[in-house]
Amino acid sequence: MATDIVAQLADSLAKTAVEDGELSYKGQGRKLDDAKSVEDMVKEIQDFEGLQALRLEGNTFGVEAAQAIAKALEAKSDFKRCYWSDMFTGRLRSEIPPALNSLGGALMLAGARLTVLDLSDNAFGPDGVKGIEGLLKSVACFTLQELRLNNCGMGIGGGKILAASLMQCHQKSSAENTPLRLKVFVAGRNRLENDGATALAQAFKLMGSLEEVHMPQNGINHPGVTALALAMQQNPGLRILNLNDNTFTEKGAVAMAQALKDLRSIQVINFGDCLVRPEGARAIADTVSEGLPILKELNLSYGEITAEAALAVVQAVKNKDQLEKLDLNGTEALSIDDEGEPEDEEDEDVDEDEDEEDEDVEEEEEEEEEEEEEEEGEESSQNKLSTPTSAPRPPDVSSFLSFPSPDKLLKLGAKRALLVQQQVDVTDAAKTAEAFLKIASVYKENNEVKNAVLDTIDGLLRKAFSTPSFQGYSFVSSLLVLLGLIKSEDKVKPVLVVPGHLHALEHIVRQDYFPKESVAVLEAFVSRGKSLESCGNARNSLQSTLQRVRSQS
């Protein structure tokens, strides 16, 4: 009896969030195909007075199930917040637009006034954007403040549809003296490229109300970056700008530096892995030194910045009282003295030909001084910088992953597995698959190299598969695409397959972290893949192992 009461209480707590007016089914992992499968949800939605928010993320809904949920929402006029990310896993792409149409139509019929719409991690492509097009243009979105569409695979076409919908919403809402004032826009990993980014920039410029913009990993080059820069100038309240892992080059970086001069509310700038290069870094440094009074974080890591340009950035942030983090990883080593000033490196240049023993002694003394300072708990009287300023330059993981070689992997040392884990975003299945193949590409039967490769791969994948948000099926799908075994709608270019890829794959399928249900999938495609014909022996060995593992599971 007591057990039943506890179970009922736990179930109620799982469904009802702390926030008033919110009903949550988050992360229950339910597969809901038809109206019967959601009868309990429908009843609870109908019975929930004053429902303002519904969390459906982490379940998977078929068209009929979504239509049943939608019917229950038609009477919920107080509804404001849709937390509907990751709710179509395993569904055909053709199923998603009608499901979204039903849900959106219900909110319009209810007379809802949305403030949050989160459809991230649904991979619905341009057709999915069409599924929410009507909702975005409607009165229900005149009050929208947060739009989150991260990792939806919108592409250029979807980006253009989204931009046009937002512009029409703004025009219609302005005509009623209630202009759309979107504050948060999130659309990372959507392959927007220049045309999609440029279209969205027009919408951003029109609204002028943005406070956060997150658009990392979208394949945007300097024309798209420049368009976004011009749009950001029209959003004076912008606090966070995250364009990580797009390709600025000098042109885009200079344009963005110019735009930042008008953004005195900016607190977080993330241009990491954006190839800003020295000229771009110096332009950004000039802007920082001249303004940005409440800047808290600046990320210019892995942007091909020279030490000289990096020092200009360090100088620029010296007097930023609120700065909490400066990330210049991946640049030439920096050295800062006790007063927060860049140390003069001219003597080092002049004495390059002197005995290496003298340099080693100096380095050891510096390291001892650092250790003493850390023990005493002393902190700089200036800013706390996230970049290790006086430490010897760490092994360059970025260089290895960009241009893999056995020698580079070995030089990463005993902590290579940890270093790679820190560099790779293991929540991103596609990027994890790319990293796996890059590491595997340097595989050799030489014991030292072989062990280094397999240890590094084990560390990376064990962490990935133990991460709750990591999608194992997406990892396997990405591997199949990159190995040329299936075609991708995204036109992803396969890698040149080498035996090391297959030897590493043979290794991981035997490990406890690898999902056994994926073994049969790999076996089916490996057996017929023409792209693997050049790796005859390695392919045969992999096939045998896959058959054996499948039979044992």
Image: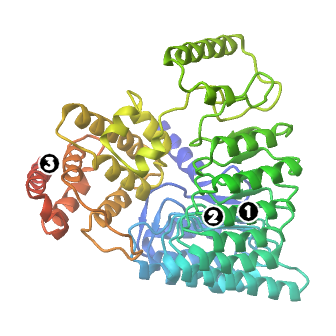
Which of the 4 quarters of the picture holds residue 379? top right
In this rendering, which labeled residue sits more in front, label 2 or label 3?
A: 2
Q: As drawn, is 169 to the left or to the right of 47?
A: right
Residue type at mark 2: give it.
Met
Q: Which residue is mark 3?
A: 549
Q: Residue at x 40, y 52 (%)?
A: 432
The residue lying toward the viewer, choosing from 163 and 61, is 163
Please say if 237 is above or below 101.
Answer: above
Q: Local crowd at mark 1 within 10 Å, few (<14), some, or many (≥20)?
A: many
Q: CA distance from mark 1 to mark 2?
A: 19 Å
Count of all numbered marks drawn on residues in the image = 3
Residue type at mark 3: give it.
Val
- CB atoms of marks 1 and 3 within 8 Å: no
The residue lying toward the viewer, choosing from 334 and 540, is 334
Which of the 4 quarters of the picture holds residue 332? top right
The residue lying toward the viewer, choosing from 356 and 432, is 356
**Image location (x, y in percent) of residue 514:** 28, 47
Q: Local crowd at mark 2 within 10 Å, few (<14), some, or many (≥20)?
A: many
Q: Residue at x 85, y 79 (%)?
A: 179
Check residue 215 in the rendering and tell me which mark sits there, or answer none. Answer: 2
Which mark sits nearer the N-terminus, 1 or 2? 2
Q: Secondary structure at mark 1?
A: helix
**Image location (x, y in percent) of residue 207:** 81, 76
Q: Which residue is mark 1?
A: 254
Residue type at mark 1: give it.
Val
Q: Local crowd at mark 3 within 10 Å, few (<14), some, or many (≥20)?
A: some
